[in-house]
Amino acid sequence: MKCKRLNELLELLQPAWQKEPDLNLIQFLQKLAAESGYRGELTDLTDDVLIYHLKMRDSAKDDAIPGLKKDYEEDFKTALLRARGTLHPDTILDALFEQGIRVDSGLTPLNSFENRVYQFQDEERQRFVVKFYRPHRWSAAQIEEEHQFALELQADEVPLAAPLHFAGKTLLHHQGFMFAVFPSLGGRQYETDNIDQMEWVGRYLGRIHQTGRQQLFQHRPTFSLDEYLSQPRELFEYSELIPRALKKDFLAATDALIEEVKRTWHTDFVPLRLHGDCHPGNILWRDGPLFVDLDDARNGPAVQDIWMLLNGDKAEQRIQLETIIEAYEEFSSFDTGELTLIEPLRAMRIVYYLAWLMRRWDDPAFPRNFPWFINFRRELIMKKIWLALAGMILAFSASAAQFTDGKQYITLDKPVAGEPQVLEFFSFYCPHCYQFEQVLHVSDNVKKKLPEGTKMTKYHVEFLGPLGKDLTQAWAVAMALGVEDKISSPMFEAVQKTQTVQNDADIRKVFIDAGVKPEEYDAAWNSFVVKSLVAQQEKAAADLQLQGVPAMYVNGKYQLNMQGMDTSSMDIFVQQYADTVKFLVEKK
């Protein structure tokens, strides 16, 4: 790629071009530029090819370069303009005029680095936004999928700016450029420290994902380690923007970070169509949230659209995450197992962002807006980035800490034989149990990590609340009927949130509302099986000398110690708790 002479470089590319029989040389070079890390050099090469051909064409030598012929459909000067990424105001005005829009104001550039976005007013004083898409970044099919998703969301009453139709089309073309027109919807900045606004955002994210789950993108990508880590790593290898004195350490830190991400990343999430870049800057506020910029929409885990909204210290982030998820689940279910993906996604974004800056450095807008990236302090800046990568590795290592007796778990002085392999104690009156079960979903995550065939049992305790004994008996009924999963959530809600459980009749109503037949509940309430299960719960609590809830025991020998877990973030805590249980189950 470093050959200076055009013919030498074309000779190197000839074998690859021959594998693309349907593309002429210009199309091949543009495709290669879009798919590789050498966009700047390949765009320069495309310029050279076009200029050389124009000269030869003027000299009546049409076939001076193989693959360029008289009947090549695109005007060569227009192709040269597009290859150089040049977009003049006259081009924009002509493109809009072709669609019947007469601009009656100036073109006000809006903040966008990937595309060229302008606000304007037409002759009827209506305000619009026009977006010209960066050449080669997305295909027409990919952009049309983004538009279709936006229109589906708009139909489902999600507040966002969807593209307008012109002659039945939302994706428009002019002189080789692709563009779209949107209504101009203003608003003030979303307040990241406003819990009420955050609750609204969580609710609408649930609605966005409810629509997103209906089908997947077929042309747009899915979040992957290859796109966000492997491809940037390859770019770092050859980039001249990283000082030579730091490159070895920088690459070593990147490699170590990639290995940590691979170790913690998992692909058992259910993918859905995402906003993809849901950070506070892409949310405006006008009597509620207004979502903008679906340019990065892709398939991936739901948590990708959540984690970038978190800010402040760990305690504040914990409250924010609880708020968002609780509001989110009014419209869409959330798999808390995805919380363990937050740190990998954070690392992937940092690496990808750095590579993005390097890929775009030949765009004049980037040196102008990111002068810190390559000024006289470049080596110091890169050193800070390297230290940040190294710090992330340490953070990953901390989240994967070794399990130590006396820290994450405690070995009981007197092991109790005959207890279930994994035994959890809880109370519907316990607020910490509510957080444990309904917000953090620790039990669900523990179940996912358990080796196949491992039995997990939950017992209710009777020493909390005025109806403690009655609820213990009710839980025995749930176990006897096999409806624990149906009863747990509504009973927590009725006892703690709505406080509608005041007597045995109220307990019975929760069961019936959950789908249990009244006659089955009544028959089980005083049955021998239920009485035996009540006695079993009481005996286990006494044998293990239970002091409080929530509490979890493994094999009657080990007790989980929440105070020894890493609480720097909710997802790390949940991951470490579940991993500790798995470790103890497998411990000989």
Image (cartoon, grey):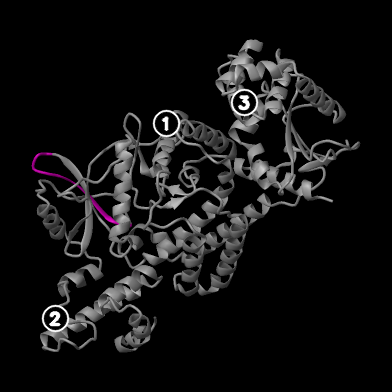
Q: Position of residue 30 (x, y in %)?
A: 30, 72
Residue at the spot of label 3? 487
Instruction: Write down the residue under mark 2.
Output: 70
Mark 1 closeness class: few <14, some 14–19, many ≥20 residues within 10 Å: some
Residue 21's disc is none
Q: Can residue 242 be seen?
A: no
Question: What residue is at 49 percent from the left and 71 percent from the top?
Answer: 234
Q: Taking the image as drawn, is residue 377 in sight? A: yes
Front: mark 1 or 2: 2
In space, the residues marked 1 and 2 are separated at their CA atoms by 58 Å
Q: Residues within 10 Å of mark 3 (few under 14, many from 20)?
A: many
Determine the secondary structure under disc 3.
Answer: helix
Q: Which residue is mark 1?
A: 200
Q: Which residues are magenta?
A: 114-125
Q: Is residue 52 above or below residue 35?
A: below
Q: In this view of the protein, which residue sits in the foreground, 448 or 208? A: 448
Q: How far, Cα to Cα, is label 2 from label 3?
A: 74 Å
**Which amino acid lies under the numbered mark 2 shown in the image of this protein?**
Lys
Residue 119 inside the magenta-drawn segment: yes
Could you say where residue 355 lies in the image, as x and y percent from the top left? 44, 63
